[in-house]
Image (cartoon, rainbow, N blue to C red):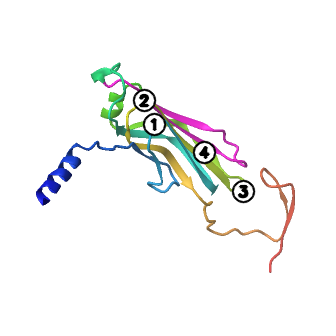
Amino acid sequence: MKTQCFFATLFLTAFAPVKTQADILLSAPGVIAGTRIATRIPFSIEYQLTSCYKFIFAGIQAKGDTLGAPGSSGTNGNGGQFHLQATVSGGSGCHTSERVGVIEFRNIQDYNTSPLQTVLISPSVTFKATNTPINIHLEWKGNGNAHKPNGIFSIVGEYQKDPPTPTGSLSFDVGRWILADNPTPEGTVSIVRE
């Protein structure tokens, strides 16, 4: 009886359909590794970095593989395309406009065999807070007919949560000083020694 049960389990394990799922790890500076994953195509996944001082968007990177695509229009019979797009924008208080980076694989075979693809934005785009912290909106998108793609898709850049801590010292003479230049307001300041 145990032998029949063993062979039945072995048969079911060996011939049962394997459930595969796309796993594209999405990453960016300030995003905890492994917390954003795309599990199907198409996808659109958003994330917000709140109360930031600065975010630099320098480009995007992608690498991975697929199980192919429907049809046979491409080389090696794979066909299909895979398009990746990343968008970075700053919230209110940020004077830098939205920027987009795009990587396109016109043939699934290119995605399957290529090394890490990097598209840099030149010059890089800096989103920086002025008087109050800003929120940075990140969005990863994937389109096309790639079948169960796996890999990585990264926004490349730098993230700074807080402004740098002031260091050093300042010394001023006692007296009245006129405030000038932006972003300081017009007026005067008095310095008194204690």
Q: CA distance from mark 1 to mark 2?
A: 7 Å
Amino acid type at image mark 1: Ile
Is 83 magenta? The answer is yes
Mark toward the viewer: 4 or 1: 1
Could you say which is closer to the camera, residue 44 or residue 106?
A: 44
Can you name the residue that lies furthest to the front here? 1
The quadrant of the rendering that contains the N terminus is bottom left
Could you say which is closer to the camera, residue 174 or residue 94?
A: 94
Q: Residues within 10 Å of mark 4 (few under 14, many from 20)?
A: some
Amino acid type at image mark 4: Thr
Q: Which residue lies at the image location 62% right of the left edge and 68% below the top edge? A: 168
Tag 3 residue: 132
Q: Secondary structure at mark 1?
A: loop
Is 147 magenta? The answer is no
Q: Earlier in the sequence, mark 3 or mark 1?
A: 1
The percent coordinates of residue 173 (x first, y second) are: 79, 69
Q: CA distance from mark 4 to mark 1?
A: 30 Å
Q: Earlier in the sequence, mark 4 or mark 2?
A: 4
Dots 4, 2 in contact, CB < 8 A: no
The percent coordinates of residue 101 (x first, y second) are: 52, 35
Is 33 displayed left or right of 164 in the figure?
Answer: left
Can you name the residue that lies furthest to the bottom here? 194
Amino acid type at image mark 2: Asn
Tag 2 residue: 145
Magenta highlight range: 78-104
The quadrant of the rendering that contains the C terminus is bottom right
Looking at the picture, does residue 194 appear above or below residue 138? below
Which quarter of the picture shows residue 131? bottom right
Mark toward the viewer: 3 or 4: 3
